[in-house]
Amino acid sequence: MKRNGVEIPQSQEYFWTKEWQERIKASEEDLAKGDYKTFKTKEDALAHLDSLKDGER
């Protein structure tokens, strides 16, 4: 696969699918709006991820 004349390794082709490009765009929009969380420690980040499994936000 080529993208803008650059050969893309097969293992990275998923990134250029419509689904992934939509996800990247949404992420960039969230960052621009300041809609993200920061954590002081990796333990805090992991605890937050665990809370998302339980349906908390």
Image: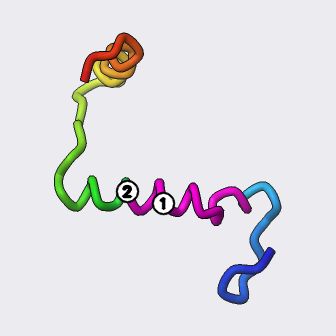
Residue with the mark numbered 2: 26
Question: Image point 79% across, 65% down: which residue?
Answer: 9
Residue 20's place in the image compared with 38, above or below, is below
Residue 32's place in the image compared with 8, above or below, is above
Residue with the mark numbered 1: 22
Q: Which quadrant of the figure has residue 45?
A: top left
Mark 2–mark 1 distance (CA, rounded to whole Å): 6 Å
On screen, residue 11 versus residue 32, left or right, reads right
Question: Image point 28% across, 19% down: which residue?
Answer: 44
Q: Label 1: how many residues lie within 10 Å, few (<14), some (14-19) or many (20+)?
A: few
Mark 2–mark 1 CB contact (< 8 Å): yes
Image quarter (top left, top right, bottom left or bottom right) of the N terminus: bottom right
Q: Which quadrant of the figure has residue 29?
A: bottom left
- Magenta span main SS: helix
At label 1, which amino acid type do we have? Glu
Q: Magenta part of the protein: which range?
A: 13-25
